[in-house]
Amino acid sequence: MIIQFICRAILLGVPLLFGSVGEIVTEKSGHLNLGIPGVMYVGAISGIIGSFFYEQACGNDIAKMNALLAVLIPLLCAIVGSVIMGLIYSFLTVTLRANQNVTGLALTTFGIGLGNFFGGSLTKLGGGEATFIALTKTSGFFSTKLPFADKLGWFGDIFLSHDFLTYLAIIVAVIVGFVLNRTRVGLNLRAVGESPATADAAGINVTRYKYFATCIGSAIAGLGGLQYVMAYANGVWTNNAFGDRGWMAIALVIFALWKPSVAIVGSFLFGALCNANNYIQGLGTATQELFKMLPYVVTIIVLVVISMRKRREFQPPAHLGLPYFREER
């Protein structure tokens, strides 16, 4: 049961890891993107659209499906859909200097509405009376495990029995952490988030970096939506079934102190907290609901602690959420 609990926690934590790392990249440029839930939702439905039409083209015959295409098409569709959402946000907040909080919330509403619209449309195209889309054939390719995992006992179950997007999420988090802290691009991006006026005076193209960070962050977050549908939900799409994963990803950014490496541990901890209520069935519904609150309670505690300590390395980028007007420099 312990091994099952750990594996389930990892599975639940991967979408949060993608979403939080994507938001960290965006926030390092000084932009607070509260549209991450909508971005993840659009990433999920974009991948579903690509997978749906690929399965239809193959006549729903798994023998005719190519494993590489079955994975690559939804993956690229999810990235494209998420990047478009990032471009919309960037155009509104960077070019038009719209309020970032309002724009992010509007983007979330727009993304969820867009996903539900296309989800309902695909359901009708699939025929029948079902209210969901089941892409179990494509999901099977995403969930393929390493062939020798079952032979290694508990070690194989915990570390080697996950879908490839789980390992990709960890790799992306490590790469993002390295780029932010060890490269010139990361230094410039952090400079833009801390003081865009100073970065601009130093010859850094502030607008380009903000667009770049937001679009890359959105692409990473969109993969979290795809992983949720293909690995956690086994390829089954139901409108409004995504839950609060996007908001938890934003909360995880604060918990991780804007550090991708900490987000890896934090995402699996959040996954464990979300999964805990499934193991306390005998304690009543009220107790289960209290357990669902734990990730947010932990985030609030961390936020209070870092606010009291006031250490610079624990603080968000100094210009986070503020528009940059070059004329005021």
Image (tube, rainbow, N blue to C red):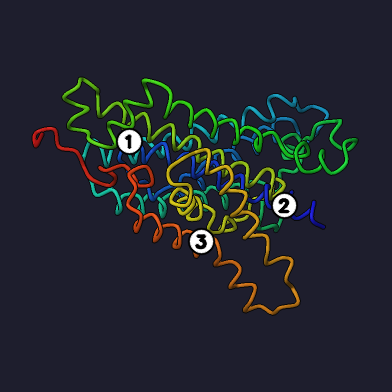
Eyeballing the image, is 65 above or below 105?
A: above
Is residue 54 found left or right of 301 in the rendered image?
right
> Percent x, y for residue 134?
71, 48
Q: Residues within 10 Å of mark 1 (few under 14, many from 20)?
A: many
The first of marks 2 and 3 along the sequence is 2
Residue 136 sits in quarter: top right
**Residue at image point 54% right, 60% down:** 295
Crowding at dot 3, Cα within 10 Å, few <14 / some 14-19 / many 20+, comes out as some
Q: CA distance from mark 2 to mark 1?
A: 33 Å
Q: Mark 2 falls on what kind of element?
A: helix
Task: Give residue 8's mark.
Answer: 2
What separation in Å lies between label 2 and label 3 (alpha carbons)?
Answer: 20 Å
Query: Along the line of sight, which residue is nearer the eye, 248 or 244?
Result: 248
Q: Given the image, on which type of amino acid does mark 3 rest? A: Val
Residue 263: give x, y in percent of width and height: 53, 44
Quarter containing the N terminus: bottom right
Q: Is residue 160 left or right of residue 257?
A: right
Is 319 on the left or on the right of 182, as rendered? Answer: left
Residue designated by label 3: 298
- According to the picture, the residue beneath numbered tag 1 turns out to be 29
Q: Can see residue 44?
A: no
**Position above or below: 80 against 289:** above
Q: Which mark is residue 158?
A: none
Few, some or many C-alpha atoms within 10 Å of disc 2 (few <14, some 14-19, many ≥20)?
many
- Badge 3 element: helix
In primary-sequence order, the first of circles 3 and 1 is: 1
- Mark whose residue sits in front, 2 or 3: 3
In the figure, residue 308 lies in which quadrant? Answer: bottom left
